[in-house]
Image: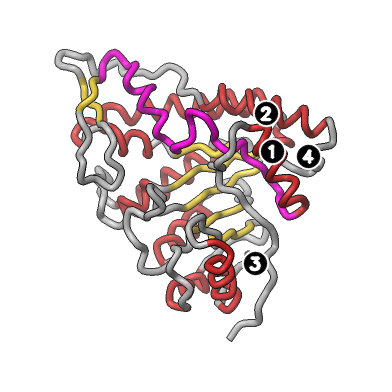
Amino acid sequence: MPDQQPPRGVHLNGSIPLANAEEVFRVTSSILGEHLHRIPDGETGVRTNWIGWQMDVLARHPSLEMIPPDPTAYAALPHFKMRPGASTGDFVFDQLGYADAALSSYAVFSQLKQAGVLPTQYRFQVSLPTPLAPVAAFIVDDEQAIVQPAYDRAMVAELDRITSGIPHTELAIQWDVAVEFGLLEGVAFTSYAHVKTGIIEQLVRLGNQVPVDVELGYHLCYGDANHKHFVEPEDTTKLVDVANGISAGLKRSLNWISMPVPRNRSDEAYFAPLKNVQLHPETELYLGLVHFTDGVEGTRRRIEAAQRSEVAAPY
């Protein structure tokens, strides 16, 4: 049995149930202090439900119309399709809203740092969904290929505005990778001929878009709608495969990877594939051991299970 190791730090993936960015910065920094290296704005207000607020962006597009949700779906949300007669040749999006939110929150972050509320070493973390996520979640399957390239370009434009407006030494970018695991598990539509290869290539492209002096991380996720995964992972095999693919493919440093641990998994079998993770020395590995729904007792149980496991990287 491997020796137990103490946790190296704390990572916040993004959403935090507080009122606004200032409250998130003040509360989380006061509790976590030096254990935290990066701090997100909590995705508060209209951004509370991860990508749910992008429905308004899609609803405003003149070429799209809304259709009712499937009540049996994992997250029963409306979908969109092309309006009859709409042109597909010049499909474009205006601003998606991510850069506006990031720049606004960074102003608060900067003020609090200058006032000594936030430690000087903190970076401002901006968590962005992969462009695949809103398209796969909200566009009907047979029209995703029309919308995806335009949304890809729009998200890269958001990233460019963020990295142009925030000092690179103060910034960290996280790509949220959730829908992709629905594709890998066979529970979501995909047009990829080779699913794992296509997903990893997409994630590497997104990572390489981030300037090299901005920190970069990925949050690998199986969803959390109503505190449930869209499918329960058998173990960490697919998570390790994707993490290894990203690490091998990037042309720049990878600063961290975050992986989920389901609420009911404190068994060695779940963690066993982590012995095959292949990350560079500078990459921090974070395991999602804290759940809202089972408190301190459940968290301690998962921490102890992780500490007993053989992991081929510090975490």
Pointer 3 or 1: first along the chain: 1
Pointer 2 or 1: first along the chain: 1
Position above or below: 182 against 160? below
Q: Position of residue 257 (x, y in %)?
A: 56, 54
Question: Is there a contact, CB below 8 Å, between mark 2 and mark 3?
Answer: no
Query: In this figure, which residue is indicated by the disc labeled 3?
Result: 314
The residue positioned 32% from the left and 16% from the top of the image is 61
Which mark is in front, 3 or 1? Answer: 1
**Residue 199 visible in the snapshot:** no
| Alpha carbons under labels 3 and 4: distance apart | 26 Å
Pointer 3 or 4: first along the chain: 4
On whether residue 48 falls in the magenta region, the answer is: yes
Query: In this figure, which residue is indicated by the disc labeled 1?
Result: 25
Q: Callout 3 environment at 10 Å: few (<14), some (14 to 19), or many (20+)?
A: some
Secondary-structure class at tag 2: helix
Amino acid bearing label 1: Phe
Pointer 2 or 3: first along the chain: 2
